[in-house]
Image: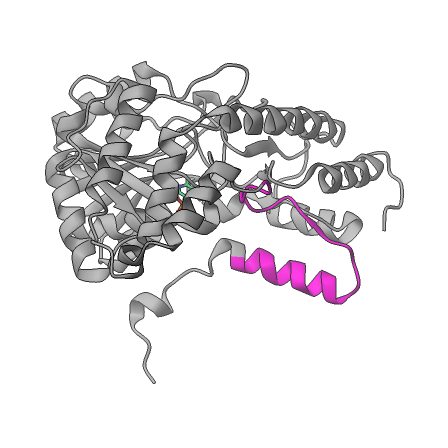
Amino acid sequence: MKLAQRVQQLPPYLFARISAVIAEKRAQGVDVISLGIGDPDLPTPPHILEALKQAADVPANHRYPESDGLPEFRRSIAGWYQRRHGVTLDPDKEVVPLIGSKEGIGHLPLCLVDPGDIVLITDPGYPVYEVGTMFVGGEVHRLPLREEDGWLPRLDDVPNAVAERATLLWLNYPNNPTGAVADRAFFEHAVQWARRHDVVIAHDLAYADVAYDGYRPTSILEIDGAMDVAIEFNSLSKAFNMTGWRVGMAVGNREVIDALTRVKSNLDSGIPQAIQAMAMAALEGPLDALDEHNVIYQRRRDRVVEVLRALGLRLEPPKASLYVWARLPEGERNSGEYAQRLIEATGVVVTPGRGYGEAGEGYIRISLTTPDDRLDEALNRLARFARGEQVL
Ligand SMILES: Cc1ncc(COP(=O)(O)O)c(C=O)c1O
């Protein structure tokens, strides 16, 4: 059998590798605690589950959904953007529901990238931006993110020859993995830059509603002129503890939304309608759960920050996202080796920053989605390790 080159060239999916290490340690009898993956541990709120139960009994929901979603779900998304971000969207032209935002992120390059076109991605970054580009024969140009720039890319450093061939720029704030946030001035500059170079911006706002200390993340569509050049991916996964239900959305520039809808209609048959009913219940129902979740994550964040600092790691507490991103102690450079050493000594899994790109080397990422009792146990082990004690 000959596998296609695009499959042969596929880097091992980051979390698959971590899962293999976890399995190996567990097989050795170690009680492994993973702080690796950003998958909320708390259940989906009850009123959202109730909507699923009711929708399951409606025979119309047993049939194929439309790939562009129920019109009432698109209207629900438009209403959400109006209320949360003050952004007005045409639900029939500027909104497309997705089977989780990852689906749309992976498919977008099919709409905008021909072989040889350049896609600008930030490094470190969510791995799907690069893989989606590879799948369509596009060329990736990495924009390194640096701590001293607040993990924002230097768009003015992109060489003109690169900008001329670029068709797509990925941005993601609140950022995975760095936890960094971007202010309006950054988005304004990015929109101007994209208009000047005729590049589409795809802003990934997966962490729109996971924020702390009163901070409210910005939608790029709030910026004047953004609708001309940008689309935004958003998701119910993280905010509503709905990663397992697979529902998200793309909104923004109507030409791009139309292209994505057409691509999707040739590849998938949309989101099960009962799950669209859940999503509507989430977007239109009470939002107390969002604040409650953020209070829990913020408390976990503060404990994680304290213990990591005791380990000699250097970091800024994130204002948003599910991640604490920390620089290795002085003298340490290899994040893979460091993470490996932590697993060996403590059974605690953290994600090596190198897995998100070269510029992530020297950092680790810790996710805040582990239940409190397990997180406490993990942090106790790390604190004992920091004091030089034998842990396992
Ligand atoms: C930055 C970022 N974008 C998108 C996603 C995908 O989320 P979903 O497909 O669940 O909407 C994730 C998931 O971890 C993410 O971290």
Name the residue nearer the viewer: 222 or 53.
53
Q: Relative to 179, does residue 124 appear above or below in the rendering?
A: below
Q: Position of residue 297 (x, y in %)?
A: 60, 29
Q: Position of residue 28 (x, y in %)?
A: 78, 65
Q: Is residue 320 visible?
A: no
Where is residue 193 shown, x and y percent of the image?
Answer: 20, 24
Asked if residue 24 lies in the magenta stretch, the reply is yes
Residue at the outermost bottom position? 1
Q: Quadrant of ligand 1?
A: top left
Q: Residue furthest right?
A: 389
Specify the color scheme.
Answer: one colour
Specify the quadrant of the image occupied by residue 184: top left
* Residue 258 visible in the displayed image: yes
**Which residue is depicted at the point 22% across and 53% down?**
138
Q: Residue 255 at what x, y percent from top left?
A: 10, 39
* Residue 306 position by quadrant: top right
**Residue located at (59% from left, 56% from top):** 18
The residue that appears at 35% across and 50% down in the rendered structure is 274
Image quadrant where one finds the N terminus:
bottom left
- Nearer-the-camera pick, 24 or 89: 89
Image-quadrant location for residue 40 = top right
Left or right of 389 on screen, residue 240: left
Magenta-drawn stretch contains 46: no
Describe residue 139's horizontal placement relative to residue 127 as left or right.
left
Q: Which residues are magenta?
A: 16-42
Tell whether 255 sits left or right of 30. left
